[in-house]
Amino acid sequence: METGLRGRDMITAQEWSRAEIDTVLEVARDLKCKRAMGVPHAYLRDKVLSMLFFFTSTRTRNSFEAGMAQLGGHAQFVDSTTTQISHGDTAKEIGEILGRYNDAIAIRQCDWGEGNRYIREVAEASRVPVLNMQCDHYHPFQILADLMTIIERKGDPRGLTVNVSYAYATSYQKPLSVPQSLILLLTRFGMNVRLTHPPEFNLLPDLVEQASENARRHQGSLEIVDDFEAGFKNADVVYPKSWGCMMTTTDHQESARISRQYSDWIADERRMALAKPDAVYLHCLPADRNVEVSDSVIDGPQSLVYRQAENRLHVQKAVMALTM
Ligand code: CP
């Protein structure tokens, strides 16, 4: 177990060692047990987390806020639109000032080309840990919860085939942060990761290269396919979700036109039947129901979406308890 994590930022899980991530998972399991047994675990009494949101959230906001209360501390919700950020407060000033009031700063800033840079600028100026609640590149707490969910259901993750796939959606250009973070992390746990997407929906090449290197080092694999149904074949875990084609265009109308070509990329029962009989379906939510995934799949027996959402709470509490 690697301790000594007090003061560490969590901006991407890639910057944490395998042993440190193992520690997070172990602490998360312990906290999950404690909550189930009603055992108090106020490890962060008198500590305050500032949560700065530039973008909407259901799960992230609620799980961080509930998690801080369960750890005996307090979380304050800050909506960027009601701050002076639009009137000139810089990332440096946010890091300096919120870091003096609080014991950690959590930020969601998903704007393409800006989010990660903003969070790193805040972290540079902050005297307390900065936690990434999702940026344009990474969603570390989501994928830690996803990994915990896979291990809970499947046990040893080495050798599992996981299909991280694009799926069609109409609601909005979803960030690349979930698929990028997934391929980076799951390859470090010896999984065979199949990245499935149409040619216009590439991920950042540097991160795909890092994921390939992770696979090489950890006896996993990374293959890239462009056929939706081939992605499901014999998979142990399927994770079909929408993301935007920002690598092709940032124009919303053009991206909607490109996406419409793939309107049949929906996770339905016929596609699920291509995976192994005991395959599980994952989605970080929110999902475009009956566009991205059929009700029968997301509400069906193979779906673990609510367990994933619950595990957000436990991994976030683990990271906060270890770093704050
Ligand atoms: N999965 C996830 O991050 O959910 P929210 O956008 O609701 O926080």
Image (cartoon, rainbow, N blue to C red):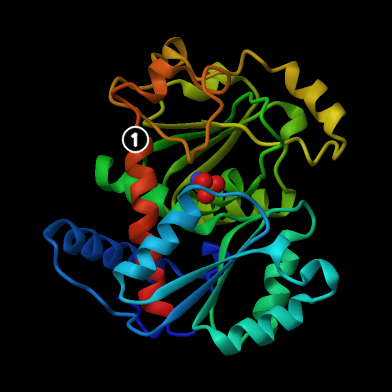
- What residue lies at 20% left-to-right and 60% top-to-bottom? 35
| 54 vs 16, nearest the viewer | 54
Give the x, y percent position of residue 243. 66, 36
- What residue lies at 31% left-to-right and 76% top-to-bottom? 72
Residue picked out by circle 1: 304
Three-letter amino acid code at disc 1?
Leu
Give the x, y percent position of residue 97. 66, 86
Q: Is residue 40 above or below residue 205?
A: below
Q: Is residue 6 visible?
A: yes
Q: Which quadrant of the rendered structure holds the N terminus?
A: bottom left
- What residue lies at 30% left-to-right and 47% top-to-bottom? 151
- Secondary structure state at the residue bearing disc 1: loop
Whether disc 1's CB lies below 8 Å from ligand 1 is answered: no
User: Is 231 on the left-hand or right-hand side of 322?
Assistant: right
User: Is 241 on the left-hand or right-hand side of 270?
Assistant: right
| 53 vs 14, nearest the viewer | 53
Count every numbered label the image shows and give the total: 1
Q: Is residue 275 above or below residue 100?
A: above
- What residue lies at 52% left-to-right and 53% top-to-bottom? 216
Task: Estimate how packed mark 1 is, as few (under 14), some (14 to 19) or many (20 or more) residues with alpha carbons within 10 Å.
Answer: many
Give the x, y percent position of residue 153. 26, 40
Q: Is residue 23 visible?
A: no
Residue furthest to the top in view is 270
Q: Which quadrant of the rendered structure holds the C terminus?
A: bottom left
The quadrant holding residue 233 is: top left
| 51 vs 145, nearest the viewer | 51
| 267 vs 274, nearest the viewer | 267
Give the x, y percent position of residue 159. 36, 41
Q: Is residue 292 above or below residue 59?
A: above
